[in-house]
């Protein structure tokens, strides 16, 4: 059960004041934010890889070797109950944005949050209404050409041939989600790094700080003088670098942070929530 202690309330006040003083706030969102929408994490207790074992690092190589067979396997519905891909698909299909997603959208609408860099592929930021968004690991509802990088929604796409080919360059089309062994698309990686370098304050929301290159972005920002605010129930590898740590679920803490931002940086005296 989440408890707003006096110490946590003070930290929320400090975080709000810091954000209001900042000129370029960026959020880095990780799996912990999606967990609060019912999507299982990959690592740790209840994690998909904890249950099923970590997948091979060769998945992208397998796709490139025979993309037609890869797509045919997807359409044969080979994923079944007891398979991590199936379990993740079911959870994501049922998931909806939680108050943490909506709080980030509010911060953007207030002009305080310039960009969200997300490690999540579940499309929940888009559903919630985020507009300035960089999906560093892709989006499960989109397709991408491995040749020219052209992206388009999967919904409504007609798979006339397998593998599907890009109308722009003739390259092979794959799911936009970044596979194991696949490089992060260069345009997204460059834009994410530019946001980190431009930021003077970065929110670390539900990220464990263990998956590169995303985990490197807060350190880039810190080295250039930015302040780091961590919002996470647990300590992470990035905690020692953070100026303010807010211990608790982002779905609870981010809405409280937004309330303080609307009040000019502090909670109303009548109630510390």
Image (cartoon, grey):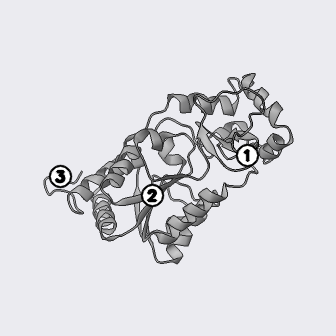
Q: Is residue 134 left or right of residue 176?
A: left
Q: CA distance from mark 1 to mark 3?
A: 59 Å
Q: Nearer the viewer, residue 209 or 182?
A: 182
Q: Could you say whether the residue bearing mark 3 is in a helix, strand or loop? A: loop
Give the percent coordinates (x, y) of residue 98.
40, 39
Q: Seen from this angle, which residue lies furthest left?
A: 270
Give the percent coordinates (x, y) of residue 190.
60, 63
Q: Which residue is mark 1?
A: 169
Q: Residue at x 66, y 54 (%)?
A: 185
Q: Which residue is mark 3?
A: 271
Q: Is residue 38 left or right of residue 159?
A: left
Q: Residue at x 31, y 71 (%)?
A: 21
Q: CA distance from mark 1 to mark 2?
A: 30 Å
**Quick one: label 1, few (<14), some, or many (20+) residues within 10 Å?**
few
Q: Quadrant of residue 88?
A: top right
Q: Nearer the viewer, residue 1 or 94?
A: 94
Q: Could you say whether the residue bearing mark 1 is in a helix, strand or loop? A: loop
């Amino acid at each position: 059960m989440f408890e707003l202690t006096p110490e946590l309330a003070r930290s929320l006040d400090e975080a709000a004041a810091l954000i209001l003083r900042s000129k370029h706030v960026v959020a880095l969102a990780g799996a912990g934010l999606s967990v609060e929408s019912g999507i299982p994490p990959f690592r740790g207790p209840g994690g998909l890889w904890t249950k099923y074992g970590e997948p091979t690092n060769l998945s992208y190589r397998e796709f490139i070797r025979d993309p037609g067979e890869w797509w045919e396997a997807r359409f044969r519905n080979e994923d079944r109950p007891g398979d991590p891909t199936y379990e993740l698909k079911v959870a994501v299909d049922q998931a909806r944005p939680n108050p943490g997603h909506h709080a980030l959208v509010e911060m953007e609408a207030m002009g305080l949050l310039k960009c969200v860099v997300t490690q999540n592929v579940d499309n929940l930021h888009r559903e919630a209404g985020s507009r300035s968004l960089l999906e560093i690991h892709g989006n499960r509802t989109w397709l991408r050409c491995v040749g020219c990088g052209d992206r388009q929604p999967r919904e409504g796409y007609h798979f006339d041939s397998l593998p599907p080919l890009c109308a722009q360059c003739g390259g092979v089309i794959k799911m936009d989600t970044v596979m194991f062994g696949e490089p992060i698309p260069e345009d997204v990686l460059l834009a994410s790094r530019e946001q980190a370098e431009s930021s003077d304050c970065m929110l670390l929301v539900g990220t464990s700080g263990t998956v590169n290159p995303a985990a490197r972005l807060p350190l880039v920002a810190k080295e250039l003088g930015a302040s780091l605010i961590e919002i996470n129930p647990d300590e992470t590898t990035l905690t020692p670098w953070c100026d303010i740590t807010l211990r608790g679920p982002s779905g609870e803490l981010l809405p409280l942070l937004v309330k303080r931002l609307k009040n000019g940086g502090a909670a109303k005296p009548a109630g510390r929530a």
